[in-house]
Amino acid sequence: MSQPVRAVPSPEALPSKAVTADLTTLLGQLSRLGLDFAAESLPALLTRAVKEDLGPPTLLEHLLRGELERREERRVRTSLRLSGLPSGQTLANFDFAFQPAVERSKLEALATGVWLREKQGLLILGPPGVGKTHLAVALGVKAVECGFSVVVYCLNKMLHAMRKDAEVPPTRLRGKKYMKAALVIIDEVGFEMFTRQEANLFFRLVSYRYQRGSLCITSNKAIQDWPEMLAGDEVITAAILDRLLHSCHVLNIRGRSYRLRDLEDSLKGRS
Ligand SMILES: Nc1ncnc2c1ncn2[C@@H]1O[C@H](COP(=O)(O)OP(=O)(O)OP(=O)(O)O)[C@@H](O)[C@H]1O
Ligand SMILES: [Mg+2]
């Protein structure tokens, strides 16, 4: 049986105490509810509402929108701090003209976060200075803004953490942030060789995260050089690559080093 629609009482019908709510009480209630921005901005907003003749729904909408925006800013700030992502490397300050091997449209598609929802991987390959770390960080920031949990490690730190957790049972391992974050970025893969134990730990990570969460790996080593990098273990390398490359975006950046651009330009000028 449908419920009868209850009529909204007109302001006249409300007890006068409710209509002329005391501002101090109201601010106290907003604060107790944790609506700090609303509490801070209500007095100014009430003045504005009188000046601009804003109705109660508009007033409330301004109040709540401001509160939500403030909360979102706080969430992004906290998540960025926890992720370990450095600041200053964004898609906005990536010079696409300098690096034509990087397609802007591809990066913009990745920035939407769809690949993270699909738990796909991302491999960024290329020689030194071409912007691998910059792009991984920039996409990490975008992922945080889209609401995903992100954590970034350089390989050394990742291996250190995994070695420390080598004996941790699987049930507890699931709680580690490199296992449970929606996006784990591993930077600088290829600078050092893995030991056999490290190759096995890396396999454990890739295997656990396969289809559970996204991995973004940057490397200066081409795929064919991975067996040598992974302690010469062809079997474990094949198992790792099979999982990594299944449903994975690959950015192969063949281009100039951004670090050396000034040097190259000055050498060109001299010749
Ligand atoms: N196309 C670009 N536009 C703007 N800045 C760039 C670009 N490419 C690289 N940079 C900057 O150049 C520096 C080196 O780039 P980055 O660290 O991303 O290189 P990399 O490919 O990770 O190198 P490595 O293999 O040595 O780690 C960084 O400060 C980065 O912000
Ligand atoms: Mg780098």
Image: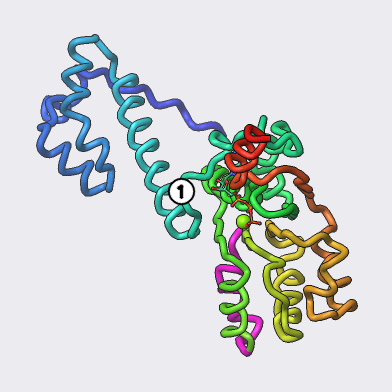
Residue 192, compared with residue 147, is above or below; it is below
In magenta stretch: residue 91: no
Q: Mark 1: which amino acid?
A: Ser
Residue at image position (64%, 41%) is 264
Q: Quadrant of the N terminus?
A: top right
Q: In the image, is 62 to the left or to the right of 119?
A: left
Residue at image position (73%, 59%) is 220
Task: Identify the residue at the far bottom of this view.
Answer: 167
Which of the two residues, 182 or 95, is positioned nearer the viewer here?
Answer: 95
Residue 176, compared with residue 243, is above or below; it is below
Q: Position of residue 268 (x, y in %)?
A: 67, 35
Query: Which stretch is magenta?
Result: 167-182
Residue at image position (88%, 64%) is 224
Residue occupied by mark 1: 87
Which of the two residues, 160 or 258, is positioned nearer the viewer here?
Answer: 258
- Place residue 175 in its image quadrant: bottom right
